[in-house]
Image (spheres, rainbow, N blue to C red):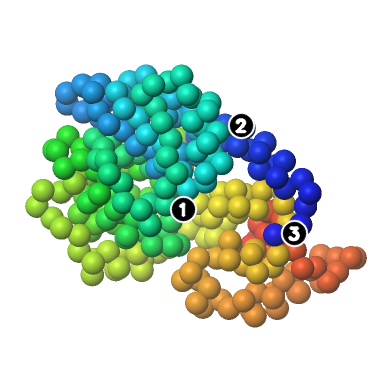
Amino acid sequence: MMPDDDDDDDENHRIEGNFEWVTKDVHGLMKTFLRPDILFEDPDHSRNVVDIGCGTSTLPSLLAKSYTNVVGIDVNPKIVKEMNMRYEKVKNLRFICMDIYESRCDETYDLVIDKSTLDYLMSADPLVYLEKIRSNLLSKRKCGRYVTISFYKPSFMEDLLEASGFELVRTTTLGDEQYVYISKRSETREPNEEKQKRVLSEIFIRNDRSMLDDKVRMCRIREKMNSSSCSLLETYNIIFSDTEREEYKYEDFLRDTRIYFQKKKAESGPYHFMNADMALDFLRTMQ
């Protein structure tokens, strides 16, 4: 990342605010999809809930009004510290710092909520993540529910969840571009690794999207690069997934960025950094 004396101030500003990853209408999300009487046949408020990748969203505080025990998980210790201070008077709400890939949670939850965290991890190892939820986080009681909010279409996501040992309860739309998938642990089907890999290999075919139509990619670029400038290597790793980088090498990216800057008639070149707007503009030239 390009050195900037304001970087710490920018990060602190983002942490102090409320960043809503999937929708600004968090109250609507709660009212329409996450109330106990909607998710469970028995709307008993005495349920454990976890929000994975909670960030600084206000959703955990809304959940705490309807459920007995709510936990927010985030990998960023600064966010966890801030959120615990912010809601220290809410006795049934707490935040813990945890890397779900590296750690094992001691609690199980009747409701596991994932606001596009699975989407974000599609370029990492989504199968390990899903198995962590199924075998470690989600309660083994029949009432346990896993809710994931995703930009990915049902033709892909429903097959991935079923191949990973989940049973779909229902799928509904959220706005014009997102979906809410509600599932539970399958009582008859274990994860099928062969089917999982086949579904993942067809991800872009099933979603029929170009890179600029890939809202997850665009959100990742905006979040990771924000208003700062990143080195070309950092930009390359943010823009493209692991699979894409196997085919489109960094040397190819450097060649194309040189051409890109030449076409833009960059007066202060050679360029060694990109911000989010430049990265998105660069992607447009690739379509």
Q: Residue 76 or 134: which is nearer the viewer? A: 76
Q: Residue at x 76, y 57 (%)?
A: 3
Q: Residue 5 or 199: which is nearer the viewer? A: 5
> Distance from label 3 to label 1 (Cα)?
24 Å
Q: Residue 242 or 6: which is nearer the viewer? A: 6
The reply to whether dot 3 and dot 1 touch (C-beta < 8 Å) is: no
> Distance from label 2 to label 1 (Cα)?
21 Å
Task: Identify residue type, mark 1.
Answer: Tyr
Measured from the top left, where is residue 200 in percent x and y?
A: 35, 64
The reply to whether dot 2 and dot 1 touch (C-beta < 8 Å) is: no
Measured from the top left, where is residue 195 in percent x and y?
A: 24, 66
Q: Residue at x 20, y 40 (%)?
A: 139
Q: Which residue is mark 3?
A: 2
> Distance from label 3 to label 2 (Cα)?
24 Å
Location of residue 9 with respect to 269 vertically, above or below: above
On residue 191, which mark appears? none
Task: Identify residue type, mark 2.
Answer: Gly
Q: Which residue is mark 1?
A: 120
Q: Which residue is mark 2?
A: 17
Q: Is residue 250 visible?
A: yes
